[in-house]
Image: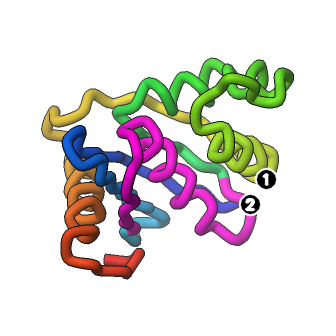
Amino acid sequence: MRKIQIWSDGACNTSDRNGGYGAVLIENGEIREIWGGQKYTTNNRMELLAALIAIESLEEPYEIELVSDSLYVVNAIDKKWIYDWAKNDFHCRKNNDLWERMLKMLSFHSITSRWVRGHNGSKYNERADELAQIGKDSLKENLTSLDY
């Protein structure tokens, strides 16, 4: 099984609720970047969407190390909270549409997650944050590209 490392991050303005997501995918030293934005969203949704979009971009099963500064995302995967939520059909769970998609990805890929402190000088975490900002800012400029 191929291995890949994914660094993901989300961003959201509380004033206009424009959000962005970004991810850096690293496989065998090759780097691919993904970014995008959504209107009327939340930071947690963008954090989760960043990881999800990156994982869904992989067309074959991978062994994935997901690195995020979001405990919301990391704990749901690492502590297996997502499986408890699924037992209740994600009832009363925010972002249930995204968590359902993530559950499918967990059955397709082998995914481990690792938390990293945000804005702490980690090269790829900082880059994922920059991409999330680009995604958020693209809403002002009406850009549509998912690839940077």
In the image, 12 versus 134, the foreground residue is 12
Residue 132's spot in the image, x, y percent?
Answer: 29, 56
Q: Do residues under tags 2 and 1 come within 8 Å of each other at their CB atoms?
A: yes
For label 1, count other residues whose C-alpha is less than 10 Å away and answer few (under 14), some (14-19) or many (20+).
Answer: some
Mark 1 residue element: helix
Q: Residue at x 67, y 37 (%)?
A: 96
Q: Residue at x 56, y 52 (%)?
A: 52
The image shows residue 24, relative to residue 142, as above or below, that is above
- The residue that label 2 is drawn on is 61
Drawn side of residue 20 relative to residue 90, left or right = left
Q: Earlier in the sequence, mark 2 or mark 1?
A: 2
Q: Does the segment drawn in magenta span residue 99?
A: no
- The residue that label 1 is drawn on is 108
Residue 106's spot in the image, x, y percent?
Answer: 73, 43
Drawn side of residue 110 relative to residue 148, left or right = right
Residue 87's spot in the image, x, y percent?
Answer: 85, 23
Drawn side of residue 98 relative to residue 107, left or right = left
Mark 2 residue element: loop
Mark 2 to mark 1 CA distance (whole Å): 6 Å
Quadrant (top left, top right, bottom left, bottom right) of the N terminus: bottom right
Q: Nearer the viewer, mark 2 or mark 1?
A: 1
Three-letter amino acid code of the residue under disc 2:
Pro
Three-letter amino acid code of the residue under disc 1:
Phe
Q: Residue at x 35, y 58 (%)?
A: 22
Q: Residue at x 63, y 67 (%)?
A: 58
Q: Which residues are magenta?
A: 34-62
The image shows residue 141, relative to residue 97, as above or below, that is below
